[in-house]
């Protein structure tokens, strides 16, 4: 299993500012993922955070808007930059410990941009 | 990439009845199919998964069936209880990167007591 600590759990931010979300895992994992979940919606993958290389972004998401750091095998950050109200959502980090195995999720960050 | 469709979007059942949620996927090479439950305000958690070498898997009141020919899999919950009320997501692995999951749209299950 994996225990993920994600923070902050929620925040209210002014438009135009940036917020950095942190995820700490209790064990080393190769791949970490960042998802966005808009209210009442499914989980949409933003990017894969790779240790030692740049993150891999999904279609519709760009590094300038969602820069990701992965300094080691237990930690990652996602920054939501130059925020607008459309960025209001829940952001979740996730890890898997092997191919075709259970994905574990952080508790999520509920972001409101005003 | 992989495309996962999930139905129904909402499902209301009487306590004690069964609930069935269905998902279809597009990539015939996919071989791992998990189901996640997300209670309000909480993180998604795995409740059951199935790999392509079996057609059915059970865990107490929960079962998952897989039809690889038709490329669909289903979640079955029997003897539903109020605590089963949640959003359920199916998922399938991304074609190119098996560790990435593509999620279905979700099903809101309401169990009425």
Image (cartoon, grey):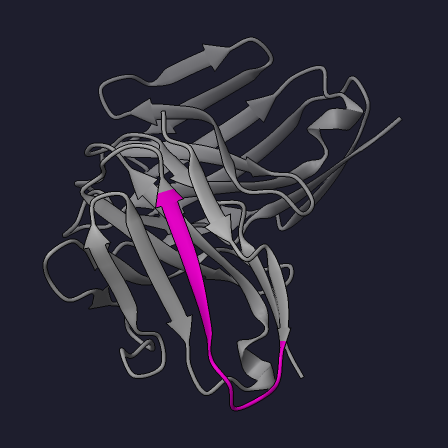
Residue name at image x 30 percent, y 74 percent: A67
| Image location of residue A11, percent across then percent down | 62, 67
On-image quarter of the C terminus of chain B? top right
- Left-right relation of B68 to A108: left
- Left-right relation of B41 to A53: right
Q: Which one is nearer the viewer's eye here, B18 or B38?
A: B38
In reply to whether residue A4 is colored magenta, the answer given is no
| Image location of residue A109, percent across then percent down | 55, 58
In this view, which residue lies farthest toward the front? A71
Q: Which one is nearer the viewer's eye here, A51 or B8?
A: A51
On-image quarter of the N terminus of chain B? bottom left
In reply to whether residue A23 is colored magenta, the answer given is yes
B62 is higher (above) or lower (below) than A29: above
Can residue B5 be seen here? The reply is yes
| Image location of residue B69, percent across then percent down | 27, 33
A1 is higher (above) or lower (below) than B22: above
Q: Which one is nearer the viewer's eye here, B34 or B74?
A: B34
In this view, which residue lies farthest toward the bottom? A16
Can residue B3 be seen here? The reply is no
Residue name at image x 71 percent, y 15 percent: B79
Picture mark count: 0
B51 is higher (above) or lower (below) than A55: above
B38 is higher (above) or lower (below) than A110: above
Quadrant hosting residue A27: top left
| Image location of residue A19, percent across then percent down | 48, 73
Quadrant hosting residue A29: top left
Extent of the magenta region: A13-24
Residue name at image x 20 percent, y 65 percent: A55
């Amino acid at each position: 299993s994996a225990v993920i600590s994600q923070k902050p759990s929620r925040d209210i931010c002014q438009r135009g500012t940036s917020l950095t979300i942190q995820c700490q895992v209790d064990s080393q994992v190769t791949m970490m993922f960042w998802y966005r979940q808009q209210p009442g919606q499914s989980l949409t993958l933003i990017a894969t955070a790779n240790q030692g290389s740049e993150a891999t972004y999904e279609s519709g998401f760009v590094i300038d808007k969602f820069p990701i750091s992965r300094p080691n095998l237990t930690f990652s950050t996602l920054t939501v930059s130059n925020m607008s109200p459309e960025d209001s959502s829940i952001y979740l980090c996730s890890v898997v410990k092997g191919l075709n195995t259970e994905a574990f999720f952080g508790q999520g960050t509920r972001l409101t941009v005003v | 990439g992989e495309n996962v469709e999930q139905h129904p979007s909402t499902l209301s059942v009487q306590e004690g009845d069964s609930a069935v949620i269905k998902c279809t996927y597009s990539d015939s090479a996919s071989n791992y199919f998990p189901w996640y439950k997300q209670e309000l305000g909480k993180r998604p958690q795995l409740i059951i998964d199935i790999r392509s070498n079996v057609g059915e898997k059970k865990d107490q009141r929960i079962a998952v069936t897989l039809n690889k020919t038709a490329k669909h899999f289903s979640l079955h919950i029997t003897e539903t209880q109020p605590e089963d009320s949640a959003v359920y997501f199916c998922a399938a692995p991304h074609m190119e990167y098996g560790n990435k999951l593509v999620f279905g749209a979700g099903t809101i299950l309401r169990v009425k007591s």
